[in-house]
Structures are given as structure tokens and as C-alpha cells.
């Protein structure tokens, strides 16, 4: 069983999607400061057709 201090720390350090989006909206320079990390990321996205009929 976790101690109350551990549970509080987990709550304080958890990030959710909204927090990340809010941070990035308010800190657009993040991508410039961290270009090396961004370049190394593989961002998943929905697969869409290429527009060519087969």
C-alpha cells in the first residue's frame, strides 16, 4: 500500500493531454529549444490514402 506522500507526489507529477497541449500553446519555443528531440521522434498519426487510385 502506498503512503499518502507517495500518492500526493504521483498526483502532482502526472501530466495529462490537456496539460501538455496547454504548455505547448504557451511555449511555442519548446520545439526550437528541443529540435534534436523533436527530430528523433516518430509521431503516430492516422493513415490516410495518398490520393492515387489503384
Image (spheres, rainbow, N blue to C red):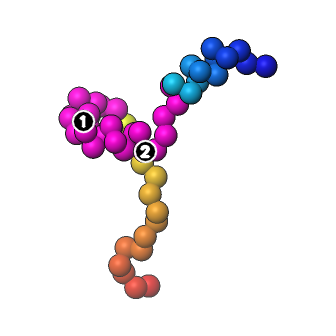
Q: In terms of secondary structure, where does tag 1 sit?
A: loop
The answer to whether the residues at label 2 and label 1 have Cβ atoms under 8 Å apart is no
Q: In terms of secondary structure, where does tag 2 sit?
A: helix
Residue shown at 36% from the left, 81% from the top: 52
Q: Is residue 36 left or right of residue 6?
A: left
Which of the 4 image quadrants contains residue 31?
Answer: top left
What is the magenta segment's predominant secondary structure? helix
Q: Position of residue 54 (x, y in %)?
A: 44, 85
Q: Position of residue 48 (x, y in %)?
A: 43, 70
Mark 2 packing: few (<14 Cα in 10 Å), some, or many (20+)? few
Residue shown at 43% from the left, 45% from the top: 18
Q: Is residue 17 above or below residue 32?
A: below
Residue shown at 23% from the left, 29% from the top: 33
Q: Is residue 2 above or below residue 45?
A: above
The one nearer the camera, 20 or 7, is: 7
Q: Position of residue 40 (x, y in %)?
A: 37, 37
Q: CA distance from mark 2 to mark 1?
A: 14 Å
Say the numbered circle drawn on residue 18. Answer: 2
Q: Position of residue 6 (x, y in %)?
A: 64, 17
State the extent of the magenta-drawn residues as a range.
Answer: 13-39
Which of the 4 image quadrants contains residue 35?
Answer: top left
Residue shown at 46% from the left, 44% from the top: 17
Q: Is residue 8 above or below residue 49?
A: above
Residue 25 in view here: yes
> For mark 1, what is the residue?
27
Q: Is residue 19 left or right of residue 33?
A: right
Amino acid at each position: 500500500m502506498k503512503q499518502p506522500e507517495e500518492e500526493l507526489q504521483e498526483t502532482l507529477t502526472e501530466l495529462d493531454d490537456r496539460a501538455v497541449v496547454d504548455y505547448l500553446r504557451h511555449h511555442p519555443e519548446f520545439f526550437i529549444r528541443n529540435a534534436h528531440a523533436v527530430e528523433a521522434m516518430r509521431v503516430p498519426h492516422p493513415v490516410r490514402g495518398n490520393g492515387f487510385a489503384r
